[in-house]
Image (cartoon, grey):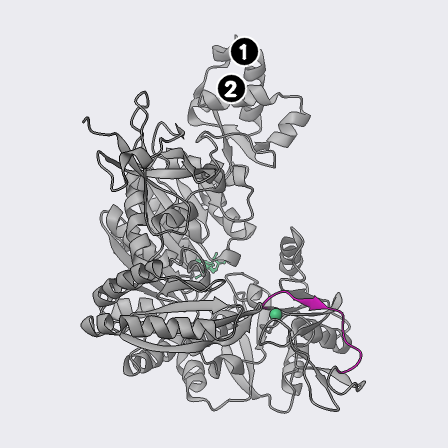
Amino acid sequence: MTAQRIIQVALPVPLRRVFDYLLPNEQHKPAIGARVEVPFGHRTLIGIVLKHASQSDTPTDRLKPITSVLDPTPAVNDELLQLLLWAADYYQCPIGEALQAALPVLLRQGAAMTPQLSTTEQCWQLTTEGLGLPDNALAKAPKQAQLLHQLRERPGTTWQALKEAGFARDALLRLQEKGLAHTCAAPPVTNSESPLNLNAEQQAALDAISFERYQTYLLDGATGSGKTEVYLQAIARLREGAEQAQTLVLVPEIGLTPQTIKRFARRFGASVAVLHSGLNDRERLNSWLRAASGEASIIIGTRSALFTPLKNPGLIIIDEEHDTSFKQQDGFRYSARDLACVRAKNLNIPLILGSATPALESLHNVNTGRFQALPLRHRANRQAAPLINVIDSSDHHQGLAAESLLAIEQHLAQGNQVLVFLNRRGFAPALKCRDCGAVVNCPNCDARLTLHHNPRHLHCHHCDFQRPILRTCESCHGHHLEPIGQGTERSEQALNQRLTSVPVWRIDRDSTRQKGALEDLFTRINSGEPCILVGTQMLAKGHHFPKVSLAIILDVDGGLLSADFRGPERLGQLITQVAGRSGRGDRRGEVILQTQNRHHPLLQRLIQQGYSAFAATLLEERQMSQMPPFLPIALVRADAPEADSPHQFLNQLRQSLTPLAEQNAVQMLGPMPALMEKKGQRYRHLLQVRGPSRHALQAFLRALAEHLDSIKTPRHLRWSIDVDPQDMS
Ligand code: ADP
Ligand code: ZN
């Protein structure tokens, strides 16, 4: 019998295995990493070739032939395939799902790997070749020649504008095919911005970076200390060494603002490509292709941009590395920061992690010598760090204390801006009956409904359930329902009533839903007129508001008393980040913290000694309680519409795996209900697994995943494994 031609294919299905298919005789062997179309049940799926084989465990007569090969060259190159195989194993995710998460949507759907015009406002410009082409070179194609001329005169014109000027799409595509024109993220800036003179600390940080080999650097720099300038100059230095070398820059989900992109584009012009969820699928694919071809030399994106193919990788940067958006919370639950270390190591290139409030994991890696710290202790504008005052808020019903109001008036009178931070949108977090004390709850979740005034309704922030505002109490039929607590809408209203002479801008997910709304707000704020900004997290990250001299943080108590072991760490990061928004201009910043726990030792440590000392204390606590980063943990979650079944399921799992756990010295805790047990009409429980070492935990989790795949799960029950969970709920 002749050997069969078989290929192993990863498919986007939630099964922890690969699938064997036959290669028809006339079919050339597809490259490893190429996409193929295959029959699967009654459907046709697109998968990735993982291996060529001559034998299969499945009897040959039951193997089906592939339908077609989509790519002449791999869609997933070897480097990325190795990374994803490693990650799939580490995060216990089926390889098909991991690959699916790493590919742009259009490639998952079978689109060709060639750039195409996007219908939206993409900009066009000439390539180096196009720029160097003599005027008569396109004499035989007058339309293309005219277009070439136009793009030489006006680089960075959008397709829309070209169309309006009478140019045909065909001519543009021809120029692109010939390698004479390409798309760019933003119009190139003709007189590009020159680098700033680095201060001594910035210079020392830059000089410490070695571009020849792998090393992770933690650029541990206070807010406003000039980290971004160090990134920019590191990129420039990399390019001095090797002109083609590419840099991948990852930023948090809400950090990728037009401001950030402009800052890179001003320095490096057209070689910047952007990848984020605000783009349409075509634009994403175009950026991805420009990175793969090496045409883009700086790629800026959010979490999943980590999986962008790079022709000449030279450097990876992760800004605000502590941000939780770098961890995917469903499906392929990877940490882009941790995988960036793996990728940089595989590529033997440097990785720079930057933050004013590094994650405890990263600080621990510095302490153990795995990462090299590059400290920036001073603000670039030479301002001292903001002055923090703590105010007891127990009598103020979480509203603004009299001292806070007074301070606001003072700062406004001096022509400055004020920021009021409150991590809760809506008008009030609860609606309560004054007669019987009943609170209006979500029917689907263990949660209260938030009262919104704008528009007026009750809203569950966990499952999106909405209903009109109640007039009577559902328990006692009384008519005295009253809002309890503060949301951003309520603070906005109170401030508007009290301070009529200045505008109050609310910045949260509700007020910025419309495209461009956030940009408009930033433009207004940066005009510098005195105003008050009231907002949530969106205000805490990365923005540069030079006129803000006072930041007020309402209600910090939630984080201090949180049941999640990461609660205090997150609170310290949030306070430090919000505080860092003030005093970025020429005046020293001031911060007011309103709390009911002003003597809490952690809060005192943070305020008196700063984030580093605070983080050191937390690390000691983590070591004592044997929590991450000292011991690796994972969660097995289960949820179902029936209250009992997740608990029973996890209990059984625990019992079946006890011998194996003992063998590996792995500890299982629980099962226990999640912090919010009922959410979206499903009951959620979890089992915590702790390993004495990564190695032991991994070995155990592999067996656990295999066991879960082999048993019959109750109908409607879903389970998942989360390695290095960031969210314990
Ligand atoms: P970070 O990213 O650490 O918050 P930025 O890079 O945004 O800080 O810098 C804060 C401000 O300081 C910016 O306005 C930046 O232009 C300015 N800045 C940074 N480095 C320097 C420098 N070496 N000299 C003068 N100004 C600087
Ligand atoms: Zn709900």
Q: Is mark 2 within 8 Å of ligand 1?
A: no
- Is residue 39 among what the camera can see? yes
Seen from the viewer's position, the closer of residues 469 and 505 is 469
* Residue corresponding to mark 1: 141
Seen from the viewer's position, the closer of residues 695 and 189 is 695
Tell me which amino acid carries mark 2: Arg
- Which of the two marks, 1 or 2, is nearer to us in this view? 2
Secondary structure of the residue carrying tag 1 is loop
Q: What's the magenta bit mostly, secondary-structure-wise?
A: loop
Span of residues in magenta: 462-473
Tell me which amino acid carries mark 1: Ala
Seen from the viewer's position, the closer of residues 339 and 197 is 339
Q: Residue at x 66, y 54 (%)?
A: 517
Q: CA distance from mark 1 to mark 2?
A: 10 Å
**Image height check: is 34 above or below 207?**
above
Q: Residues within 10 Å of mark 2 (few under 14, many from 20)?
A: some
Name which quarter of the figure residue 375 lies in: bottom left
Label 1 or label 2, whichever comes before in sequence order: 1
Q: Of the numbered discs in the image, which one, if any, rests on residue 174?
A: 2
Q: Position of residue 277 (x, y in %)?
A: 53, 49
**Image height check: is 521 above or below 213?**
below
Q: Of the numbered discs in the image, which one, if any, rests on residue 27?
A: none
Q: Answer yes or no: do the residues labelled 1 and 2 have beta carbons within 8 Å?
A: yes
Q: Position of residue 647 (x, y in %)?
A: 43, 75
Give ligand 1's quarter of the image.
Answer: bottom left
